[in-house]
Amino acid sequence: MTALLHRLVTDCFLPHSTRGCLEAHVREVHFPAQADDLGECVSAKSIKDRHERWGDHIPANDVALWDWRSGQDDDTRMELLAHCVSFGVNALHEKPNPYGGGVSQHGLDVRLSQADRLARATGLDMVAVGWRPTVGNYLGRVTKPWIIEAVREGAGDRAAQLIEHLKKGDMAKEAERLLAETDWLPEPLRMFDRDADVDADAGVDTEADDLPEFLAGDGEDDEDPQGMVAAE
């Protein structure tokens, strides 16, 4: 436990760290695309503040770090371990590559299934942590039919009808306003039991679906071709 924690803390906090004798690491996951204001969200600020608080106490010397960690109680060590491991959580959807390189369909299924299990185990609630649909993080990155459907689910049929005539940019802005005080979440951020859905999907050919349904569409009225990253 001490050796593992030492390895991970070294990677997360010490600049120019060397690999050392333990071949273990957590690879930090970065979004290939993200909203401009993602770094200002509640969760991002919380993680940054927590990292800085730990950094104020962690020695910058390898030997001193080992001695410091050895003197911490079990609760403190476990909290620090969880902080370091959290940087390696990967719940991103990406297009599977059947020809090698990147992630396979099976690998993607396992990743997302484990991510859902972890979210349930930790009680993750994206509404409670402050996520709201905005033009930058969702509404400006999907087609008009998906914007209308989001408003219909979150604010009702009448609200959806009121924005149907708008152009894409105006529609996204108005949808952000209409959904601001709701608890609506896009499909990738909702909690559901993947194992329970296996039987319901039996006999359905899903191999042809390179992307989840929320990214599908004819794109005729989509002024922004950039796809939304589910993890945003």
Image (cartoon, grey):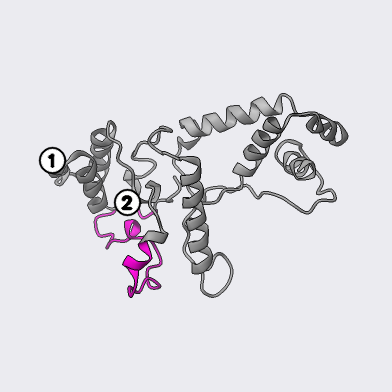
Left or right side of 220 for 10: right
- Pick whichever, 57 or 81, lies toward us: 81
Above or below, 159 against 92 in this view is above
Label for residue 51? Answer: none
Residue 220 point in image, percent of width and height:
25, 60
Tag 1 or tag 2, which sits nearer the N-term? 2
- Pick whichever, 167 or 143, lies toward us: 143
Above or below, 184 against 42 in this view is below
Any magenta on residue 223?
yes
The residue at 63%/39% (across/down) is: 82
Residue stretch in magenta:
197-226
Q: Quadrant of residue 151?
A: top left
Above or below, 212 against 86 in this view is below
What residue type is disc 1 on?
Leu
- Look at mark 2 in the image and give the residue it sits on: 142
Count of residue discs: 2
The residue at 47%/30% (across/down) is: 42
- Pick whichever, 106 or 133, lies toward us: 106
Label for residue 162? Answer: 1
Above or below, 212 against 148 in this view is below
Residue 150 point in image, percent of width and height:
25, 46
Quadrant, the N terminus: top right
What residue type is disc 2 on?
Val
- Pick whichever, 223 or 31, lies toward us: 31
Residue 96 point in image, percent of width and height:
49, 66
Q: Secondary structure at mark 2?
A: loop
Which residue reaches farthest right?
63
Left or right side of 4 for 136: left
Left or right side of 205 for 118: right
Q: Secondary structure at mark 1?
A: helix
Residue 75 point in image, percent of width and height:
67, 31
